[in-house]
Image: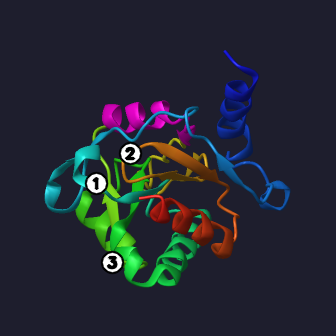
Amino acid sequence: MSTLFRAVAALVAAMLFVFAPPSYAESALHNVRGFLPDLRFTLVGPGAKTFTQDDFKGKTVLMFFGYASCPDICPTTMAQLSQVMETLGEEAAKVRILFVSVDPHRDTPEILQAYVEAFDSHAIGLTGTEKQVADVARRYRVAYQIEKPSKDDPGNYEVAHSRGVYVFDGQGRARLLAADTESVEVLSEGVKRLLAQG
């Protein structure tokens, strides 16, 4: 295993984890081409339809893991990604935001899609069985932990999860990894470069 590969793995596992204070996260767009796996998943989206990576061929994909009940990180990141889409203008039609829920118990396809569409019309909410979600999270080294709910209120619990934005090009190749604290300007420039490359 190369030193660079280990560095990328450490970056994904450590720098982007939710427990790290935002003020300590570095502001940089990391080139991960060849060091993170291509876009691949089988999950459930709007209308309870099964989606795979093939549904997004030719699109640049911004993938983010979170959950609809998230009190701070997820809405902030989704707002940032929606601003990125605004800066792209007509080019936004070539980009999709994929919000993968790590809370499949509460996030039904309907709830999740309503949540993401409140931020951007190009966003797709994806969920699935526990195994489907775990498989995708494992593939991209995303850590998450669901707190044990109380007996009095089983639907009220929090979820700790990795944070970061994965960017895939139109061929589904992992190209960029950004901290959720990255600026809209830097993210936008990164996406524009990928779009220009076709």
Q: Which residue is mark 1?
A: 56
- Report the disc number at residue 172: 2
Q: Which residue is mark 3?
A: 121
Tag 3: amino acid? Ser
Front-lying residue, 119 or 70: 119
**Where residue 94 sits in the image (x, y, percent)?**
35, 68
Residue 195 falls left or right of residue 124: right
Question: Element under label 3?
Answer: loop
Span of residues in magenta: 130-145
Front-lying residue, 45 or 188: 188
**Where residue 186 sits in the image (x, y, percent)?**
67, 68
Question: Element under label 2?
Answer: loop
Quadrant of the snapshot with the C terminus:
bottom left
Front-lying residue, 178 or 174: 174
Within 10 Å of disc 1 (Cα), the crowding (few <14, some 14-19, many 20+) is some
Question: Which quadrant holds residue 153?
Answer: bottom left
Q: Main secondary structure of the magenta part?
A: helix
Q: Nearer the viewer, mark 1 or mark 3?
A: 1
